[in-house]
Structures are given as structure tokens and as C-alpha cells.
Image (cartoon, helix red, strand yellow):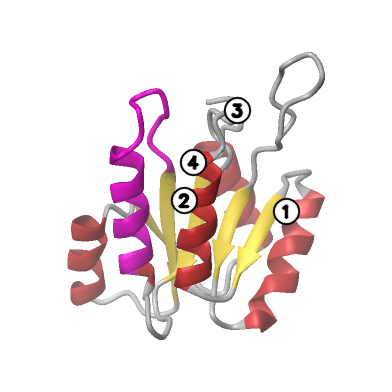
Amino acid sequence: MVSSQGRCVCKSKVMYVDDDAFNMTPFEVMCGMLNVPCITFTSGEEAISHYKATLDKKCCPKGIPLVITDINMPVIDGFEVAKQIRELDQATDGVRHRVNVLALTAHVTDKVEQNVTKSGIQEVIPKPLEHPVLKQVIKEFYNPFI
């Protein structure tokens, strides 16, 4: 959205994707405590669609600088979410910067670690997500001014 002065007034947000709606409220509360705007989705399809729509906004240089996705989801899992977001980023006009994509899982296995690298996920965060961990993730990976 553009103001009357021609400036972008959209707010940068952390995107959280998890098929278990029970996990949304704690995430939103923790983001509120950290004063970080967030947007949540319960499916990979919705998240990818929203991410693409955000990229299509010509006024926003970086609407979503950080995506945190659950790995184990039906239809489109977290690996595929990361892969498609990476592909969308590469398809942009070169002005945008690479989004940070992190994954959540309760089970880190060798197979998970192999797929992390292939899909473009930068880091795996253990579930359940706790406030000190989210605070560190925000500090390290969330830059709304990119």
C-alpha cells in the first residue's frame, strides 16, 4: 500500500506456517511480546500464495523477511514451502533480497537434515518453540528494513 506521499506503508512481518492451529496463538503472543508483526497460515498452499502476492506488491521491498515453517504438514510440507519460496525469490527482479527460511520440527533425523539443505532451509528449530529461542531467531534472522 502506498501513502499519499508515494511511500510504502506496508509492515514487514514474520510468516509462520503450521498445520496445527493450536500452535498459532503461542507464536502470535510471543511475537507480540517481542513487538514483531506476524502473519500465520495453517497450510503451505496458503503461505506460498500469500508470499507470492506480497512479492507482487511493487511498493514493498521486503514484506516478509523471515518465514518459519513446520516441516511435517499434509499436502505441501515445510521442505516444499521453502523450495517454492526460494524459487519465487529467484524469479523476482533482482531488487529483493533473499528471505530467511527456518524450519520447526520435533524430530531431527538424518533424512530431515539432508532435506533441509536441498530445500533451502537455513536452520532447524526444535519444537515446541520457546520464547528465548524465538527471541534469538528474531534477533538473528528478522530484518524488516532489508
- Whichever of labels 1 and 3 marks the residue nearer the N terminus, that label is 1
- The correct choice, above or below, for 54 with respect to 50 in the image is above
* Image point (54%, 74%), residue name: 18
Chain part drawn in magenta: 79-99
Q: Which residue is mark 1?
A: 31
Q: CA distance from mark 4 to mark 3?
A: 9 Å
Q: Secondary structure at mark 1?
A: helix
Horizontal side of residue 133 vs 110, given as left or right: right
- The correct choice, above or below, for 19 with respect to 114 in the image is below
Q: Which residue is mark 3?
A: 59
Residue 126 visible, this orientation:
no
- Whichever of labels 3 and 2 marks the residue nearer the N terminus, that label is 2
Q: Which residue is mark 2?
A: 52
Marks 2 and 4: in contact by CB < 8 Å? yes
Q: CA distance from mark 4 to mark 1?
A: 23 Å
- Whichever of labels 4 and 1 marks the residue nearer the N terminus, that label is 1
Horizontal side of residue 47 vs 98, given as left or right: right
Q: Which residue is mark 4?
A: 55
Horizontal side of residue 60 vs 114, given as left or right: right
- Where is residue 10 drawn, in percent x and y? 70, 35
